[in-house]
Image (cartoon, rainbow, N blue to C red):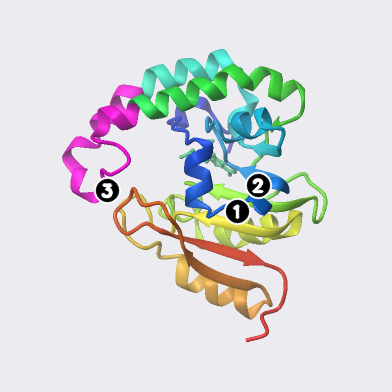
Amino acid sequence: MPFTLDQVVPWGRSLDEYRRLFGLSEQDLAGSILGVGDGPASFNAEMTAQGRRVLSVDPLYAFSAAEIGRRIDETYDRVVDQLWPILDSYVWRDFADPHALGRHRLATMQRFLADYEVGRSQGRYVAGSLPTLDFADNQFDLALCSHLLFLYSEQLSYEFHLAAVKEMCRVAREARIFPLLDLAVQPSRHLAPLRAELTGQGYQVTIAPVDYEFQRGGNRMMVVSKQRSNT
Ligand SMILES: C[S@@+](CC[C@H](N)C(=O)[O-])C[C@H]1O[C@@H](n2cnc3c(N)ncnc32)[C@H](O)[C@@H]1O
């Protein structure tokens, strides 16, 4: 099915949020990183400004900055408004309320938009979609996927999740996925079977706590690598 802009509600996170939600160390940040489904996050822009190496892949990057900017304007109020009735599902520690969150997200997405056309011409923003990535085996040290897998568990099948994680592990030495909760702020129904199947196929799978919690209870990531576990 072709990917259309009206399917997307752009909502992007910052480098500081990526750093916390993926538990990124200085050593992690110094490596070559693939951001899968980075969308309008400012992770790539901020990392590049620091002289670091990130390539972002997302079907959204088939569109221009003007088109993505228009879509942000069209959807912004709706995204902020829908949070008020479900405030208790979230931890309001980093952001006082949905308005403060929205202002932060907007600044983040503006940072992305300011970098986007230059980054696209430099090959830092590449149009592409899981579960098939057009990169070489082990091209990256780390593949990160924030707020796509597990979050959209109702929309994306178990088979999609399995193929997507294995593809991330093909192109990178290690894959990290956050969050492990779905849009209803419940543990993803794909998590336990996926963990078991990947482990059975020889992947090393760890569920690790992280220093980030916005969805209540959503403070863990999945780390997957190809090495066989010794335990
Ligand atoms: C909720 S946004 C998360 C953006 C960013 N990762 C963040 O955390 O701020 C989900 C992103 O996944 C992208 N996406 C949707 N389907 C995808 C697929 N099959 N492969 C890669 N990215 C996809 C969307 O275009 C969107 O940018």
Q: Is residue 97 part of the magenta span, yes or no?
A: yes
Q: Is mark 3 in CB contact (under 8 Å) with mark 1?
A: no
Q: Helix, strand or loop at disc 2? A: helix
**Separation of marks 1 and 2 at Cα, in angstroms:** 6 Å
Within 10 Å of disc 3 (Cα), the crowding (few <14, some 14-19, many 20+) is some
Q: Is residue 222 visible?
A: yes
Question: Which mark is drawn over residue 91?
Answer: 3
Residue 166's quadrant in the figure? bottom right
Residue appearing at x 46%, y 15% in the figure: 70
Question: Which mark is drawn over residue 156?
Answer: none
Q: Main secondary structure of the magenta part?
A: helix
Residue appearing at x 77%, y 44% in the figure: 134
Q: Say left or right for 184 vs 209.
A: left
> Which mark is nearer the camera, 2 or 3?
2
Image coordinates of residue 115 in percent, x first then y, are: 62, 21
Residue appearing at x 27%, y 48% in the figure: 91
Choose the circle earlier in sequence order: 3 or 1.
1
> Over which residues does the magenta segment extend?
76-102
Q: Say left or right for 161 vs 133.
A: left
